[in-house]
Structures are given as structure tokens and as C-alpha cells.
């Protein structure tokens, strides 16, 4: 068993390295001033903390994380809690996750592997990055660590009730990351594999307890969603939408919003509903919206099976790529302002290569590793089925670390035996696999960074700084629709409608199906007195989105002015 001193040292390193990163970026953009999903979680948590515990609409995003953040906001004054206290809590939860993973490694491969697993967990730098973001990934990673620990404990335990705990943790993970629902069948398969010598009734009992633990929390959420008019939704209503985003004729394996420029969560929900209702011709409940997009994706897949299969392999390549695919915040840009992240810590490619080596070393004991391998397979498929962000694959890292620890453990064993040749060879191999992925030196996504910095500046009211960031976005990506549209909005706010018109015309050229681009162009034309052209653009905006209030208001203004000019 791993000594208490070693365990304490590993847990302390896990905490201290994250605290060092937090201290380095405490005043940085995206850490103190939030963007996109982090901003939405903060807004949602504040509403819950203020008393809106039920909400008014079916869940579109996974709900557990904002409720956990809301508890922090209730316990700590908001001025202090937003968001520093949440980051500190996430670091504490990461320490608990490290402990659970160490115990899982101990059950699988002994104390040396447990120590190596704890070391790898402490040194995995993307964990530090996400632990200091107001995102659910930190809790999801620790939930996976606990799930793997309980799976191994359940296999060794004579008490079937441990499987109820497995199901319960699986449900909470599904309320953090909905794709866990697709992993659940792999856990049920595990109960079947472990029935040897116990009989059918014992296996069925364990399976039933796992399902009971999994379904109870989800039934609560499903009842709440149904009561608010969403139909039967055990987690959220974005499953079908996300499946279409990841599986359509123009999909490339990464995220692309349904409506250009509307990647903010509230717009995502409304955009998906409006487009679905336009296609169907009637109002739709949340589950019907999700079903519409799911059927569309499946129809395309059945009509173009070769393209569909090719796309899945593309996404599989993205999943195993060494690049940290960004969402709102770029990992490589954060490295430029965080000295801890610039240390040669462990990253995805190194963890994957070391895990492959560990799998080869453990090839004669694969049955022992079946809980880890089945979870890894299920998680990979559940991500690849949709689209890839690096944070979506992050919950797969704990399982990789368990396998990646094996070469380190074998090197330690060789050192203890005094086998210098094997020790040197093993440690050299670990060093090469660890450091080689750092050689490409991926640059930051400049256009993404400056666009989001521009949005933050605009929210602060610093319009000049916002415009400068949007210009730098276009310098890096001249076809960036959102930056073009936002520059037009800034010009319109400054009263320069000629410049605004030019920007909006460029935005329409970049994305002809954007109702916002047409509506804003119509508004600029109206301000310039070009009524016929304005009416044409505003009508097109309402054709694309009948609920575009800006277009509707300006069209009413235009008609009122026309009436005033009638003799």
C-alpha cells in the first residue's frame, strides 16, 4: 500500500501546482472576466442562488454544475465567490479526484503504479488549465476518477449494493456531461463480464442496482423538464442539435453554430428551436426540437453512408490529435501568461503514448483492466459521435493515466532490483514519449483569442479596445464573420452608418443565411435613407428568423415613415 507520506506529497503537489497556476492568471482575461459558457454558468448560478431553483424552461445545458456553483454563491458573498471561491473548490475537488485515482491504481497494479498515477495526475497541465476555468470539466474529471475507483471496488466486493453507488456516480456524471448516457451500456456490459462463478441472478441483481442508481437522479430531472413543457428529457434538450452539428454535409468534426455568429448558449437554444419550427411549421416542445435535429442527421447518414463513415474517422483523428482543441479559451494562449503551464508537464499525446506502452506491458492481464478499457472505449465513441473539443475528451484522461503509470512503475521496479540497463531504458523511453509532443509548439489561435478579448472589451464598455481586437481577428482570419459583424455594430453605435453598411455587406457576403447580418444591414440602410434597400434586407432577415425583433422594429419604423410621406 502507498505510504501516507507519499500519498500526502502527491496530493499536496496536485493542489500546489494548481494554486501556482491560479496565482499566475488570477487577473487574466477569461479567468476574472468570464466568456461564453463560463459566463452563462455564472449567470445561471447567480439566478439559482437568488432563489430561482426550479427555473422556467427545460434544461438545454447540463444542469449539475451551475447548481453546485450556486451553492458556493449562497455560502460565500458573491463579491468573493465570483469566481475565485469556485476555482478554489475545483482545486479541492481535483485533490479528491487524485486520491480516488490513486486508490484505483493501487487496486489494479499495486503501490508503485499508484504513486506513478498520482504523479501523472499532479503534472497533467491541461487539468490545471480547466481547474481554473468556470467550467464543469473539473468536476467531471473527478467524477470519473471516483467512478473508476468504485467500478474496481464493486468488482472485488461481495456486496452488490456497491453497484448502486456506481450507477449514482454515473448519473451525476451524466448531469455534468450528457454523453455519459452513451457510456452506461458499457458499464452494464461490465456487470455481465463479471458474473463468472456468481450465477445469473447475482449478475442481474448487480445490473438492476446499477440501473437504479443511474435512473433515480435522471428521473428527477426528467420530471422537472416534463413539468416545464419539455417532454421526456432525462438530461438536456441539446442532444439532437449537437448530433446534427457533428454530423451534417458541411461538418468537419469541430463545432460550428447552427446560426453563424450565435454560439452563445442562449442563442444556440433559440436558434435550434426557430429553425426546427420553421421546417415543421408548428411550435415544438424541447424534446421535439432535439428529435427533429436527430432525425435530420440520421437521414443524412443513411443517404450518404460513405461520407458519414469518413466523417467519423476524421473525428476519431481529431480525438487522438495532440492539439488541444479550444472552445472559448485557448490553452496555448494561456501558456503565454502562466509560467506553470510553460513547464514541460504531461499533455494529451504523451499520456496517450505512455498509456499505449502500458497497455502493451499489461497485455497478459487485460481482463483485470476491463473496467478501465470499457470506459475508455465508451467515452471515446460518445465524443466522436458528436464533435470534438479537447475539454470533451478530458474525462478520458484518468483512465489513460492509469495505463500510462505502468511504464513508470516498471522502471521503478527495475531500479529497486538494481537492473541499471532496464531502468535506464525504461526512464529514457518515458522521457522521450513525455517530451516529444512538446516539440511542435502549437501557436495560439490568434483569431479566437482576439475575438473573445474584443467581446470582453465590448462588455466592459471599452469600444475602442474592442474594435482593435476585432481588427486583429480579421488580420488573422479575414473571413471571420462574427468579427466583421461586430465591427459593423460598433460603427453603427458610433453613428458611422456608411462604415457600418460596408461591414454588414461584408458579413452578408460571408454568411448569406444570417438573419442578424441582413437585419443590421437593413438598419444601417434605413439610417442612410435608402428605404427600398433597407426594406429588402429587413424582409430577408424576417424570412430567415420571424422572431428577429430588431428587423421587425425597423420594418415597422420604415413603414411608419412611408405613411408620413404619403400626401
Image (tube, helix red, strand yellow):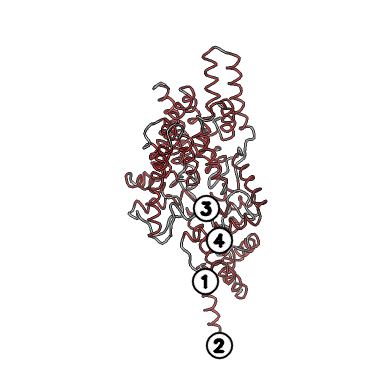
The residue at which mark 4 appears reads as 489
The residue at which mark 2 appears reads as 567
Q: CB atoms at circles 2 and 4 under 8 Å apart?
A: no
Q: CB atoms at circles 3 and 4 under 8 Å apart?
A: no
Q: Which quarter of the rendered picture does the C terminus lie within?
A: bottom right
**Within 10 Å of the Cα at label 3, are there few (<14), some (14-19), or many (20+) other Cα atoms?**
many
Q: CA distance from mark 3 to mark 2?
A: 46 Å
Tell me where residue 193 appears, x and y as whole percent: 49, 36
Q: Secondary structure at mark 4?
A: helix
Q: Is residue 459 left or right of residue 443?
A: left
Q: CA distance from mark 2 to mark 4?
A: 35 Å
**Within 10 Å of the Cα at label 1, are there few (<14), some (14-19), or many (20+) other Cα atoms?**
some
User: Residue 455's mark?
Assistant: 3
* Sequence-first tag of 1 and 3: 3
Q: CA distance from mark 1 to mark 3?
A: 26 Å
Nearer the camera: disc 1 or disc 3: 1
Nearer the camera: disc 1 or disc 4: 1
Q: CA distance from mark 1 to mark 2?
A: 25 Å
Q: CA distance from mark 3 to mark 4?
A: 12 Å
* Sequence-first tag of 3 and 4: 3
Q: Which quarter of the rendered picture does the N terminus lie within?
A: top left
Residue at the (39%, 22%) spot, across then down: 4
Q: CA distance from mark 1 to mark 4?
A: 18 Å
Nearer the camera: disc 1 or disc 2: 1
- Above or below, 455 against 98 in this view is below
* Sequence-first tag of 1 and 4: 4
User: Residue 552's mark?
Assistant: 1
Amino acid at each position: 500500500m502507498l505510504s501516507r507520506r507519499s500519498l500526502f506529497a502527491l496530493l499536496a503537489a496536485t493542489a500546489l501546482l494548481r494554486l501556482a497556476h491560479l496565482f499566475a492568471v488570477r487577473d487574466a482575461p477569461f479567468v476574472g472576466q468570464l466568456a461564453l459558457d463560463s459566463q452563462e454558468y455564472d449567470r445561471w448560478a447567480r439566478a439559482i442562488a437568488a432563489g430561482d431553483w426550479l427555473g422556467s424552461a427545460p434544461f438545454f445545458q447540463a444542469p449539475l454544475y451551475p447548481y453546485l456553483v450556486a451553492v458556493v454563491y449562497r455560502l460565500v458573498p458573491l463579491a468573493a465567490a465570483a469566481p475565485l471561491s469556485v476555482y478554489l473548490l475545483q482545486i479541492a475537488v481535483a485533490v479528491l479526484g487524485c486520491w480516488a485515482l490513486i486508490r484505483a491504481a493501487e487496486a489494479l497494479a499495486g503501490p508503485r503504479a499508484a504513486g506513478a498515477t498520482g504523479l501523472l495526475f499532479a503534472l497533467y497541465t491541461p487539468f490545471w488549465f480547466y481547474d481554473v476555468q468556470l467550467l464543469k470539466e473539473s468536476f467531471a474529471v473527478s467524477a470519473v476518477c471516483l467512478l473508476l475507483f468504485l467500478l474496481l471496488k464493486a468488482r472485488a466486493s461481495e456486496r452488490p449494493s456497491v453497484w448502486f453507488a456506481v450507477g449514482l456516480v454515473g448519473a451525476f456524471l451524466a448531469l455534468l456531461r450528457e454523453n455519459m448516457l452513451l457510456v452506461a451500456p458499457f458499464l452494464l456490459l461490465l456487470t455481465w463480464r463479471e458474473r463468472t462463478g456468481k450465477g445469473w441472478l447475482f449478475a442481474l441483481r448487480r445490473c438492476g442496482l446499477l440501473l437504479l442508481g443511474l435512473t433515480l437522479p435522471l428521473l428527477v430531472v426528467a420530471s422537472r423538464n416534463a413539468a416545464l413543457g419539455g417532454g421526456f428529457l432525462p438530461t438536456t434538450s441539446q442532444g439532437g442539435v449537437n448530433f446534427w452539428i457533428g454530423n451534417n454535409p458541411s461538418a468537419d468534426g469541430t463545432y460550428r453554430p447552427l446560426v453563424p455568429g450565435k454560439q452563445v448558449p442562449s442563442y444556440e437554444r433559440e436558434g435550434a428551436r426557430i429553425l426546427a419550427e420553421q421546417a415543421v411549421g408548428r411550435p415544438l416542445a424541447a424534446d421535439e426540437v432535439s428529435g427533429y435535429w436527430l432525425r435530420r442527421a440520421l437521414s443524412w447518414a443513411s443517404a450518404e453512408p460513405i461520407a458519414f463513415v469518413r466523417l467519423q474517422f476524421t473525428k476519431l483523428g481529431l480525438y487522438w490529435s495532440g492539439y488541444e482543441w479550444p472552445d472559448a479559451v485557448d490553452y496555448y494562449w494561456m501558456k503565454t501568461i502562466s509560467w506553470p503551464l510553460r513547464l514541460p508537464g504531461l499533455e494529451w499525446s504523451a499520456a496517450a503514448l505512455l498509456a499505449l506502452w502500458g497497455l502493451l506491458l499489461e497485455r497478459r492481464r487485460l481482463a483485470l483492466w476491463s473496467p478501465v478499457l470499457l470506459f475508455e472505449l465508451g467515452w471515446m465513441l460518445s465524443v466522436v459521435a458528436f464533435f470534438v473539443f479537447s475539454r470533451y475528451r478530458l474525462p478520458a484522461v484518468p483512465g489513460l493515466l492509469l495505463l500510462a503509470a505502468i511504464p513508470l512503475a516498471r522502471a521503478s521496479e527495475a531500479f529497486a532490483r538494481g537492473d541499471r540497463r532496464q531502468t535506464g531504458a525504461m526512464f529514457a523511453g518515458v522521457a522521450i514519449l513525455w517530451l516529444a509532443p512538446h516539440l511542435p509548439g502549437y501557436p495560439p489561435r490568434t483569431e479566437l483569442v482576439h475575438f473573445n478579448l474584443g467581446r470582453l472589451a465590448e462588455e466592459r464598455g471599452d469600444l475602442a479596445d474592442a474594435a482593435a481586437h476585432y481588427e486583429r481577428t480579421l488580420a488573422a482570419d479575414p473571413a471571420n464573420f462574427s468579427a466583421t459583424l461586430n465591427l459593423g455594430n460598433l460603427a453603427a453605435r458610433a453613428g458611422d452608418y456608411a462604415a457600418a453598411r460596408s461591414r454588414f455587406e461584408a458579413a452578408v457576403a460571408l454568411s448569406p443565411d444570417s438573419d442578424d447580418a441582413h437585419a443590421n444591414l437593413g438598419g444601417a440602410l434605413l439610417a442612410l435613407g435608402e428605404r427600398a434597400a433597407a426594406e429588402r434586407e429587413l424582409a430577408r432577415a424576417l424570412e430567415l428568423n420571424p422572431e428577429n425583433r430588431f428587423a421587425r422594429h425597423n420594418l415597422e419604423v420604415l413603414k411608419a415613415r412611408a405613411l408620413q410621406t404619403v400626401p
